[in-house]
Amino acid sequence: MIEYCKHTDLAWAAGIIDADGCISIRHHKPSSKQFRHSDTYSLSVSVGMTHIDAIDKLQDIFQCGNRYIQKRYDTANHRPMYVWQCCSRDAVTVICFVYLWLVTKKRQGKLALRFNDLRKVSTGGNGHYVSPAYVHRRHIYYELMKKYNARGAQAIALSVYRP
């Protein structure tokens, strides 16, 4: 992960995440082929843009995550979208480093860190029993993050009514 990084690079990364990124909680339902029996949730930070140099710089700054090309099938005139994404503990680390400079994604960052704090007080996980109450609490955070990341009329209504 990060050994040394300039504050200006972290501020730049926060601006890119604010403008073209997404802080989210991913919901994974168990399939019939998996051993686990309850839903799981994980943090994710991703940035998608057509400028590959910015994606490479994010990778260089944080030294984590994956880069890939997201193909766009809607029209032939679109340039390819390059995506950088990190999940789970790497996402928490990235949020901790850029949180000070986040503006538009500040609420999502705060909720993500609170979501991560749930893990510290839980018993179980990593193949061990997890209580239904714990899974339910994580689901509440997932639903709230979906509302924070909503577009259109729902987002406008939420921005007027801030918790």
Image (cartoon, rainbow, N blue to C red):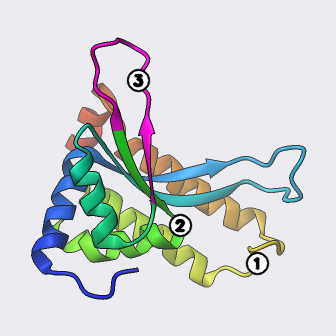
Secondary structure type for disc 1: loop
Q: Is residue 74 magenta?
A: yes
Is tag 1's residue or tag 2's residue first in the polypeptide sequence?
Answer: 2
* Left or right of 103, for residue 38: right
Q: Which residues are magenta?
A: 66-81
Q: Give the position of the N terminus as an image quadrant.
A: bottom left
Is 117 rendered above or below residue 60? below
Is tag 1's residue or tag 3's residue first in the polypeptide sequence?
Answer: 3
Amino acid, disc 2: Ser
CA distance for labels 1 and 3: 40 Å
Secondary structure type for disc 2: helix
Question: Which residue is at the front of the view, 66 or 132?
Answer: 66
* Left or right of 137, for residue 102: left
Question: Which residue is at the front of the view, 125 or 15?
Answer: 15
Q: Residues within 10 Å of mark 2 (few under 14, many from 20)?
A: some
Secondary structure type for disc 3: loop
Label number found at residue 124: 1
Q: Give the position of the C terminus as an image quadrant.
A: bottom left
Q: Is residue 24 magenta?
A: no
Q: Please say if the residues under marks 1 and 2 sit with CB atoms less than 8 Å apart.
A: no
Task: Identify the residue position indicated by label 2 in the image.
Answer: 88
Q: Position of residue 101 (x, y in %)?
A: 16, 68
Label number found at residue 72: 3
Is 20 rendered above or below residue 123? above
User: Which residue is pictured at 20% across the width and 41% down the height?
Assistant: 160
Question: Which residue is at the front of the view, 88 or 107?
Answer: 88
